[in-house]
Amino acid sequence: MNTIALRISDFLKNHPPFSMLQTEQLLAISQAVEVHYIEKGQIVFETETPVKDQFYIVKDGAIGLYRNNHSNLVDECDEGDIFGLRALMRQGTYQLSAMAMEESILYSISANLLTEYITVNQKASTFLLQTFVSNSNFNTTDSFIDGAIKNAADMPDFNEELSASYSKNPIHCSPETSIQEAAKTMTLKRVGSIIITQNKKPIGIITDKDLRVKIATGTVSIDKPVTEIMSAPVITYPKNISVAEAQIAMLQHKITHLCITEDGSNQSELKGVLSEHDIIVVRENNASVLVKEIKRANTTKELQLIIQKTQQLLNRYIAQELPIRYITSINSAIINSLTNKIIEFAISKMVTAPPVPFAWLAIGSQGRQEQLLLTDQDNCLVFEDVSPELHQQTQDYFLLLAKEITIQLNQVGFEFCPANMMGSNPKWCLSVSQWQAQFKRWITKPDQDNLMLCTIFFDFERVYGDSDMVDQLSDSIFKSIDSYEIFLNYLGLNALQNPPPLSFFRNFLVEDSGEHKDQFDIKARAIMPLVDAARLLILSKEIKAHNSTIARYTKLAELEPQNSDLYFACIEAFKNLLYFRTQQGLLHEDSGRYINLQTLSKANKLELKSAFKAVKAIQELIQVRFKLSQLM
């Protein structure tokens, strides 16, 4: 072996997945590696250009990965970092561009080397699977969990760890079937493959490629049995194979179809076929793609179709039991992106541009990034202060704009708020100073109505527009609370309005009248007590950067380690309740708020009752901390 190859080997063996390879595998790769000297500012590959048949590892220097014509740095790769591998797996075009941030030396490794030496190594292949789904440069952090996703560029591709959707009615034939009959069946059924089975077990496969290469060329007669040209043995996997596993398996075996069997072996019954096309379909219906479709959309009709796809995506995520925080972050990112597009549509329909800067705020569950099912709208608008003589015409402009926004949101699937808590209502379309005055009034006069408004409007998130004025609103809330501290006590009393949702005899407290008589209100009796408690406690700490319930309890656990067990119990309870409500909503095609207890299994009821313990515990903490027994 030459000296350069030895140096490459010495370098690679210190970095995974190369450190996991056997010596002969590593040496073989090192001999075939290409070395690249890259000047500062030189492009390695560009967004939207065809993926090269190789990936890269940084030997020296630094490579930046960018979006938007090198204006948005997504990641920085330095010594030992790998980049371009996800693109190689995915094929198509690059979604990022790579440019040298300083003079660099890169090693490039071809797809053939990947399949021949790396994916066949069990440890290295496992490492690839783990890192492939992490959406980072072999840096398996989940930093996006620490806050809601603000930009589609930061959105992880969770389809990689989802179970792949496969054809559950595979076309198959017996070994005695002639090639001609098999081809006719494939043509009739419009499929690109047919499985040869014996006693319901897969023993071989024929694809369109086999017909082209072995039949169309005259190599084999079409009268021969399918066993003459079938590929055998077939590659089999169990039903829960993930998208990432499927892609790596196809790459490793250089095939385009996998057989899905009962136990994952070729000795059990055939259950389906997973094709390369199926993987492409999954990838074309993921969160990142949906956000891109939103950006390209020109009509509300297109956005309506995207909302439908979003609900299908949500169904998949729930069915695959992905962490609820991942799901809510992704769903919020999609909804926010869609709302941004609608606001752009609405502004384009106005006769003139907005007269002053403004911001569109989501409130309630969407403001907390906890909206999963399509519910009614909750939003408001804030605009920059203007002189008194210009105020009315400025507000009139924004009321007209807000009306157009809410109409279009309704057209794509978000119902109008029954209580009219929308930016099109003059009460909720105000200047910065008006909002500040209104917040102060609610805080200093905390009657039942004002407290209810605080629980809705204090959970706001900027979706569009100026961020400075939104910060001003947050600051004004804390300033008003500081001047009237007893407000927190009243807010505490309000948080105790719904006690733990079990009666003295350990039965669920259900609605005793009305449309939902004898049904359990999971939102009011279980979810909102946890939400209200988190809001109260985080406000008492004067922390404004945490809007979601989970983020609030996480921050509280950090600030109060002595109560961390309780706060983490609240997180688990909240996640379970939100998950359960979403499942019920998808099952019954409604909001999931009211649950018929008769439809629940004993296990379901036990899970819910377990979550209620956290509600009881957090309410007891609030009662003691804010000395509420004196006010009750």
Image (spheres, rainbow, N blue to C red):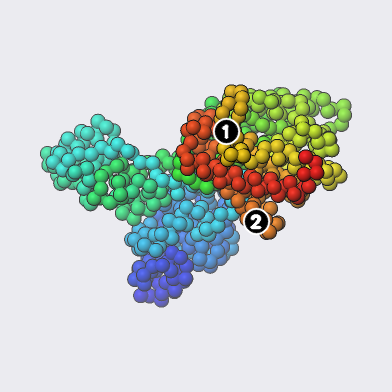
Question: Which residue is denoted by mark 1 in the rendering?
Answer: 520
x and y, in percent, of residue 60 in the image: 53, 67
Q: Secondary structure at mark 2?
A: helix
Q: Is residue 475 left or right of residue 25?
A: right
Q: On the picture, is 395 further left or further right than 388? A: left
The x and y percentages for residue 52 are 43, 53
Task: Judge whether 385 appears above or below 104 on screen.
Answer: above
Which residue shows up at 18% across the image and 44% down it? 198
For the residue marked with disc 2, what is the amino acid?
A: Ser
Q: For the C terminus, which image quadrant?
A: top right
Left or right, 506 with respect to 448, comes to left
Is mark 1 in CB contact (under 8 Å) with mark 2? no
User: Which quarter of the picture shows residue 252?
Assistant: bottom left
Mark on residue 564?
A: 2
How far is the residue under mark 1 from the one under mark 2? 29 Å
Horizontal relation, residue 201 to residue 282: left or right = left
Task: Please rate how many residues cluster around mark 1, counting C-alpha atoms within 10 Å: few if below 14, some from 14 to 19, many from 20.
Answer: many
Q: In the rendered structure, which disc, 1 or 2, sits on the residue that comes first in sequence?
A: 1
- Give the amino acid type for the residue marked by disc 1 in the picture: Phe
Q: Which residue is located at x 28 percent, y 51 percent?
A: 265
Kindly tell me whether residue 441 is visible in this rendering: yes
- Please state the horizontal and vertical placement of residue 120, each as a whole percent of the image: 34, 61
Residue drawn at point x = 61 percent, y = 27 percent: 512
Residue 69 seen in the figure: no
- From the viewer's side, name the closer residue of 360 and 108: 360
Q: Which mark is residue 411?
A: none
Which residue is painted at 12% across and 39% down in the image? 223
Q: Secondary structure at mark 1?
A: strand
Instruction: Pick whichever, 18 or 379, lies toward us.
Output: 379
The image quadrant where one finds the N terminus is: bottom left
